[in-house]
Image: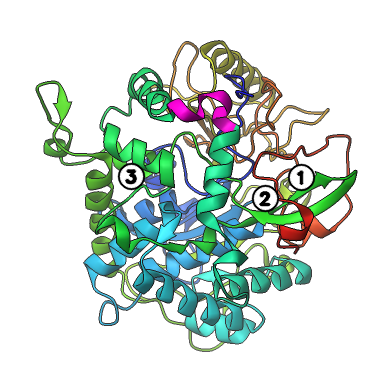
Amino acid sequence: MTTPAGSGAGFGSVSWWGLSPALDLQAESPPVNPDLQADTEHGTPQLNVLLLGSVDGRHLLRTLASVELWSPRRFRFYVLENNLEAVARHMLIFSLALEDPEKMGLQERSEAFLEVWGNTLLRPPVAAFVRAQADRLAHLVPEPDSLAEQLPWISLGALKFRERDVLEAVFRFWAGGEKGPEAFPMSRLWDSRLRHYLGSRYDARRGVSDWDLHMKLHDRGARVIHIHEFRRWRDTGVAFELRDSSAYHVPNRTLASGRLLSHCGERVAARGYWGDIATGPFVAFGIEADDENLLRTSNAQPIKTAGEITLHNVTKLFRALTAWGRPRASEGNPMEVPGEEDGTREPAARGPASFTIYFLPLHSSQTLHHKTCYKGQFQLLYVACGYLVDLRQEQLQAFTARVGELAQAAGFAPQPGARPSETFARFYKSRDSAFVCTDSVAEPGPPTPEVLVPPPGVMDLLPEVLVSPHEARNPLSEDLIQPLQGRTPHPVPLQLPSESQVSFSQALTPPTGSQTSKPESDWIPRNQVPHL
């Protein structure tokens, strides 16, 4: 049976990559006010950013790579995801981005990043790197002192003990604790998802890919995505083919996640690929470039593919990140910052600037605004809402209207003088208004300011909204969860069904709520499901 257009089934129930271009968050933040934002110990202005559902760290990477364009600042990034696999990917991506250049060259790091980030299959050398890093991270997660010494830019202190245990289990799975391809048969899982998504159109999938690319993605601004790379990704899940196709054959375990499926009237926990099979990982780094020559066309056709532009942009980012040097643990006692009651601490600054990524507990968006340590701490809020090629124009327009209503009800107004954007909706909040931090789940009660949508009438691949509590412009990110197949997305944004997207540990707990997670065609008979 063909999946109805607009069902959102192609997006899946978990997001692995962003569907909007990477942002320099300093360009969206308020001007530096040294008197109000200075770190009393180091005398350097700080930028505190709360990111809900940023997924892949692209905004953080670009922000850190662009520090030379702005006055010196210290950064505190507070990252909240709705699954621990996404947290693990954040940690792996930053470990790769900040790898010692003497151990891993710039080109090797850039190519490895593209494979891990956006390919279902890896080359053996890249797979070996993932296993080694995962094993290292699995040993560091339960050892806070060792983690602070080796990766001082990461703070897991706010996570619950159970969440840290699950995070360690995720890394151990990546490290190959379960041997053999059947532990995660990626090619079979991908094809099964694709068959369910296309239904009776499966045999005509090449034509469907061409239609989706030309009539949807190209029309929404992603014209540099080449038909051949999009077809290849739709067929195999390999977006970035930097070597001969035969070199990619090791399953990318970082794209595995848990989900509850229904089997014989029972809820069964299964590990599989539940991510995007409709849009692809080309948008985040592959459709914009500072060098306009990369976007030139010849005979109305782009001269560079999205894959080539992505490699160029990522290489440029990693080259800039190398200039940071490798942050080192502070000597003596670490400096305490707002959030210490949740176990979040920041090492003293060294070098031109410093940054710390604080990972917050899952589903804590509903309680952050009750914690005094977070009130008034953020100059920028980024909330994600993901869209894909399946959604119809009227759905996007309805969501746009809903976003404006919720933002206004929460005390936000459109950013005056904001540059036009088909991707981000920007809002600000006056300094004298109370800080509002609402849940990313649409629930009865006060509307949320985290709704991100382009201005009315604007169609885009991925509307995101920027909200700023202190006269700041603030980007909203892509929605990580989409309604399951067979349902039409509700116009209220940012729904995170806990039963369809779960971490391995969550998959073992009894479901809550009235929604039932329906199995897709990638359902596997019980005796073949890798139980969690």
Q: Compared with residue 318, is residue 207 higher up or lower down, i.e. above or below?
A: above
- 81 or 1, nearer to the observer: 1
Of residues 57 and 239, the one nearer the viewer is: 239
Q: Mark 2 points at which residue?
A: 82
Name the residue nearer the viewer: 44 or 202: 202
- Taking the magenta stretch, the answer to whether it contains residue 200 is yes
Query: Is there a contact, CB below 8 Å, between mark 1 and mark 3?
Result: no
Query: What is the number of the mark on residue 404?
Result: none
- The part of the chain drawn in magenta is 197-204
286 above or below 389? below
344 relative position to 381: left or right: right
Q: Is residue 217 visible?
A: yes
* Whole-number angstrom distance, CA of label 2 to CA of label 3: 23 Å
Between 75 and 316, which is closer to the camera in this rendering?
A: 316
Disc 2 vs disc 1: Cβ atoms closer than 8 Å?
Answer: yes
As drawn, is 374 to the left or to the right of 48? right
**Amino acid type, mark 3:** Phe
The residue depicted at 26 percent of the width and 34 percent of the height is 226
Q: Earlier in the sequence, mark 2 or mark 1?
A: 2
